[in-house]
Image: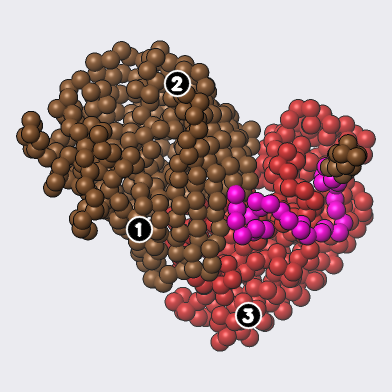
Chain colours: A red, B brown
């Protein structure tokens, strides 16, 4: 166990990166996460306490796909920390090396709150977690060569468990290939692509635009036509809206989360995916 | 021929529009994404703020103290702000806010509100900002009208800093202290004259406390405006944040040689935000500022040397009821010495109570309805109702807390 003074100070913008940093860094790192697992990650307050955490950080792990564009830039300016500025040795852009989905062909806000870089919810595909774990391990090793073997050991263990779990998750969802699910926001596109589900019906009429009655009527019609029996809802999204839609179509509302800690018993990334897969598979199996 | 091109263009646009919501199996990088963060060296945005309304007081500019407040019964273009920002190089970030306004006579005025560079990677928690910028005094002064919670600026801002806020060309050093909580110390040195430094040099021919101004040019370091500020913040549990600050501004004023002004201010913000916030709602925030000014007026051929003290403040609460809806209330008060022209309404004690409700269709637009009751010494009470509309294009820089 390294003393806290020597530990790498890691800041993660959202909790899944924090969970991966903890899995790789173990006792050698001290991880602070800015966004709460239960809140809308697009709208996090740029609180002064976050500036303090960033000013002391050796490593910053961000998505790098515009999800944090509304709050990270003023925090970084306040933090004035060259180590984690763009291009700094401690800056990790998690989306680096990941093929993003839904990259808009045109940037037009009449189509909703588009992310220019593509859909930023790529960590819902556990295949991408491996890419991020490798990336985080490389940066930890560069900054703290003395503990590199420990980081690599943790990374290998994480990747091995992830691979084993991937088999379990794929098996659990295998009976539901091609089954559609309704979600609030296009958060589950990567998850669906990985496990052979279909996610293209949303309670939001356009990304970031709150549900409207005419759109919900359209959603309910699609649910009846396509026999969609599952509506996924996250802790910060309106469960009332999801319930109203589910009630009228005989569907089930399933509580899921994209962030570790957002649901009971989802302390780390693998536990989160376990819980999400289990909840979705059980609802689809009904 | 032109029509053919037009049709082809239209068809292409429609085809694209249909493509977008569909899953794209092979995402292609965007060749040019004009104005998008991270795709250009320069982010550009345009923010339009327009108000319409009425007041029982026909002299609206006498009622509203801000240069970007509603200026007349009927429609007002409050503020059309073009913002350019981006990384200059690995060492600086640059920003310029160019403001366009249409006055009551329909003439367009251009203002260079801010144009500055700020360091990004100095060691030891230091940061330097240089250029033309809104002085970091209190909470409202350094911010732009579109980020305010009300249609107009607080009365105390107008009283202490004039219609356009305290801003000038200068430089600021800031130190983020190595404390376990947020603790920042700033010191600004700026030019002290002009219409954006009304409590100090001001504009030749203007009148303060009944005395005409004739500001001096800078002859020594003592002729500049100095603004220290300290701010601290701490979180209370997971959902509450408190920010407190103290600011001061010292500089020469335009009443004559050796005459100085000091302004002191304290400010506080408390915010609660749900741990399950959807688009940042629900929340409650309470914010207040109090300021006092000591204005030493030099002797004139007719008037003796004299010191005027006045003060003011506001307290406001905004409740973010549910996603995209807020309700807010504000109480404003200013008072103190009225100066050598007891009839000048600009220095009379006054109070105001305002209520507002805002709907944000998205974070890029808003519609705000505000009612205000004004109680002014020696003048008739006034009731005003304003409807404000905002639209925002492009990649606007995110706001500070």
Residue receiving disc 2? B72
Residue at point 17%, 45% (across, down): B260
Q: Residue furthest front?
A: B1
Residue receiving disc 3? A151
- Magenta part of the protein: which range? B16-44
Q: Is residue B258 left or right of residue A238?
A: left
Q: Nearer the viewer, mark 3 or mark 2?
A: 2
The quadrant holding residue A12 is: bottom right
Q: Position of residue A233 (x, y in %)?
A: 72, 44
Q: Position of residue B111 (x, y in %)?
A: 45, 41
Q: How far apart are labels 2 and 1 at the CA level?
A: 36 Å
Q: Position of residue A16 (x, y in %)?
A: 65, 61
The secondary structure type at the circle numbered 1 is: strand
Q: Is residue A101 left or right of residue A34?
A: right
Q: Is residue A87 above or below residue B270?
A: below
The secondary structure type at the circle numbered 2 is: loop
Q: Position of residue B278 (x, y in %)?
A: 61, 42
Q: Chain of mark 1?
A: B
């Amino acid at each position: 166990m390294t003393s806290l003074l020597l530990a790498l100070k890691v800041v993660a913008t959202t909790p899944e990166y924090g969970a991966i940093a903890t899995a790789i860094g173990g006792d050698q790192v001290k991880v602070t996460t800015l966004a709460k697992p239960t809140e809308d990650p697009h709208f996090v307050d740029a609180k002064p306490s976050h500036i303090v955490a960033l000013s002391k950080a050796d490593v910053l792990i961000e998505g790098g796909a515009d999800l944090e564009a509304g709050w990270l830039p003023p925090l970084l300016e306040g933090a004035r920390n060259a180590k984690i500025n763009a291009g700094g040795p401690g800056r990790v852009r998690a989306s680096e090396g990941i093929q993003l989905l839904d990259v808009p062909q045109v940037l037009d806000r009449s189509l909703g709150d588009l992310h220019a870089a593509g859909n930023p919810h790529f960590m819902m595909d556990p295949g991408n977690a491996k890419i991020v774990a490798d990336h985080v391990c490389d940066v930890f090793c560069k900054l703290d060569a003395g503990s590199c073997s420990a980081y690599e050991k943790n990374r290998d263990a994480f990747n091995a468990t992830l691979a084993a779990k991937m088999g379990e998750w794929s098996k659990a969802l295998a009976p539901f290939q091609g089954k559609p699910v309704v979600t609030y926001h296009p958060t589950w596109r990567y998850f669906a692509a990985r496990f052979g589900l279909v996610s293209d019906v949303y309670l939001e009429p356009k990304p970031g635009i709150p549900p409207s009655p005419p759109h919900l009527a359209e959603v309910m019609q699609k649910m009846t036509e396509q026999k969609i029996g599952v509506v996924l809802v996250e802790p910060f999204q309106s469960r009332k809206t999801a319930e109203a839609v589910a009630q009228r179509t005989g569907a089930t509302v399933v509580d899921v989360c994209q962030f570790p800690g957002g649901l009971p018993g989802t302390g780390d990334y693998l536990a989160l995916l376990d819980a999400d897969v289990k909840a979705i598979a059980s609802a689809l199996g009904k | 021929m032109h029509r053919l091109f037009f049709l082809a263009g239209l068809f292409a646009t429609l085809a694209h529009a249909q493509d977008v919501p569909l899953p794209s199996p092979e995402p292609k990088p965007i060749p040019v994404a004009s104005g998008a963060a991270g795709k250009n060296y320069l982010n550009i945005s345009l923010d339009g703020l327009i108000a319409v309304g009425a007041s029982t007081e026909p002299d609206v500019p006498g009622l509203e103290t801000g240069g970007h407040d509603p200026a007349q019964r009927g429609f007002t273009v409050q503020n059309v702000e073009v913002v350019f920002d981006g990384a200059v190089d690995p060492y600086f970030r640059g920003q310029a806010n160019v403001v366009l306004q249409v006055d009551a006579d329909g003439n367009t005025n251009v203002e260079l509100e801010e144009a500055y560079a700020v360091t990004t990677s100095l060691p030891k928690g230091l940061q330097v900002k240089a250029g033309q910028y809104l002085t970091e005094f209190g909470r409202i002064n350094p911010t732009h009208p579109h980020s305010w919670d009300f249609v107009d600026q607080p009365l105390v801002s107008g009283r202490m800093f004039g219609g356009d806020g305290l801003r000038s060309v200068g430089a600021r050093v800031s130190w983020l202290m190595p404390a376990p909580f947020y603790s920042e110390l700033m010191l600004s040195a700026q030019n002290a004259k002009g219409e954006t430094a009304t409590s100090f040099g001001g504009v030749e021919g203007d009148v303060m406390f009944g005395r005409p101004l004739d500001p001096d040019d800078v002859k020594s370091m003592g002729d500049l405006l100095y603004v220290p500020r300290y701010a601290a913040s701490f979180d209370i549990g997971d959902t509450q944040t408190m920010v407190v600050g103290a600011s001061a501004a010292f500089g020469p004023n335009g009443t004559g040689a050796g005459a100085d002004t000091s302004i002191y201010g304290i400010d506080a913000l408390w915010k609660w935000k749900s741990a399950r916030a959807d688009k940042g709602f629900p929340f409650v925030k309470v914010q207040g500022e109090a300021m006092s000014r000591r204005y030493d007026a030099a002797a004139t051929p007719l008037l003796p040397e004299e010191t005027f003290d006045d003060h003011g403040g506001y307290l406001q609460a905004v409740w973010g009821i549910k996603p995209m809806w807020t309700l807010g209330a504000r109480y404003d008060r200013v008072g103190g010495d009225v100066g050598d022209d007891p009839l000048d309404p600009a220095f009379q004690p006054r109070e105001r109570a305002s209520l507002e409700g805002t709907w944000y269709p998205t974070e890029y637009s808003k519609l705000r309805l505000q009612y205000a009751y004004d109680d002014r010494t020696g003048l008739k009470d006034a009731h005003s109702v304003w409807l404000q509309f905002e639209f925002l294009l492009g990649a606007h820089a995110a706001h500070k807390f």
